[in-house]
Amino acid sequence: ARTTASGAAVGSSACLASEAGVVLTPRNDSLSVGECMAIERTCFEACEVMDIAAELSHKRIQLICASAAGGVVGYVVLQSFAPASLGANSYAALQRSLLLVNKLAVAQTHRRKGVGRALLARAIGHAYSTRAEACVLHCDEANRPARTLYESMGFSVLDRRMNFYRLGRHALEMELPLGSGQSCESRGPHEMSAFFDFSATHDG
């Protein structure tokens, strides 16, 4: 197990995947993307559905799928941001690298089996392998299971975004520092708000 800068122990994604009965692999083939899209449409409201195929055409995007005997049962979409990639007019003041957990979803038939934890552990491992200084995400404030998972893996809440998803549905900006450089918290929530605004529309 790896211990993050926040002191949380993150188990091996391979071990967690084995315990959950899934295999984690990077994918970009049309069949896997189609299976992910089927899960995406059942997990999120229409206005929040991501076009995963379109996202994969951008730079620094990776799709990791959790597969069982019946096919894909969960996935995570990751996006890497290096300071130089953000540009002078976007978020150059960040001056460090981040890994954004853009989407994480698990089919209803495989929830509460450890699939989400295995995917998140893989995401954190990827962040370490790319030397990201922090792993960041946003979470629906009302999604208690997701928030509990993230906090158990060392993520902490930095800020609350009102009406982020739609009127009355708020988001929590969360961060996991990885032990290199300053945490987002030390830079202030307004900078992270700017980052999330930018990353939501970034074309890679």
Image (spheres, grey):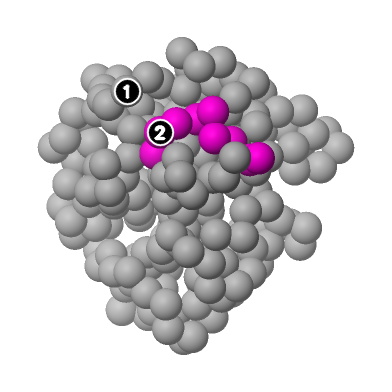
Q: Amino acid at mark 1?
A: Gly
Q: Is residue 71 above or below residue 119?
A: below
Q: Nearer the viewer, residue 199 or 120?
A: 199
Residue visible at 65% across and 32% down in the picture: 194
Q: Nearer the viewer, residue 153 or 90?
A: 90
Q: Is residue 115 visible?
A: yes
**The label number, if any, that marks residue 181 in the structure image:** 1
Q: Residue 140 location, x and y as percent?
A: 63, 37
Left or right, 77 with reference to 15? right
Residue visible at 47% across and 23% down in the picture: 184
**The label number, if any, that marks residue 96 in the structure image:** 2
Asked which quadrant contains residue 37, the reply is bottom right
Query: Which span is picked out in magenta?
Result: 89-97
Q: Residue 178 location, x and y as percent?
A: 29, 30
Residue visible at 33% across and 69% down in the picture: 26
Left or right, 59 with reference to 52? left
The secondary structure type at the circle numbered 1 is: loop
Q: Residue 72 location, x and y as percent?
A: 41, 73
Left or right, 131 with reference to 33? left
Residue visible at 65% across and 48% down in the picture: 200
The extreme right residue here reads 167
Q: Amino acid at mark 2?
A: Arg
Q: CA distance from mark 1 to mark 2?
A: 8 Å
Q: Is residue 188 magenta?
A: no
Query: What secondary structure is the stretch in magenta mostly built from?
Result: loop
Q: Is residue 54 above or below residue 47?
A: below
The secondary structure type at the circle numbered 2 is: loop
Within-10-Å neighbours for mark 1: few <14, some 14–19, many 20+: few
Q: Residue 22 location, x and y as percent?
A: 27, 65
Which quadrant is home to the C terminus?
Answer: bottom right
Q: Nearer the viewer, residue 67 or 81?
A: 81
Query: Do labels 1 and 2 touch, CB within 8 Å?
Result: yes
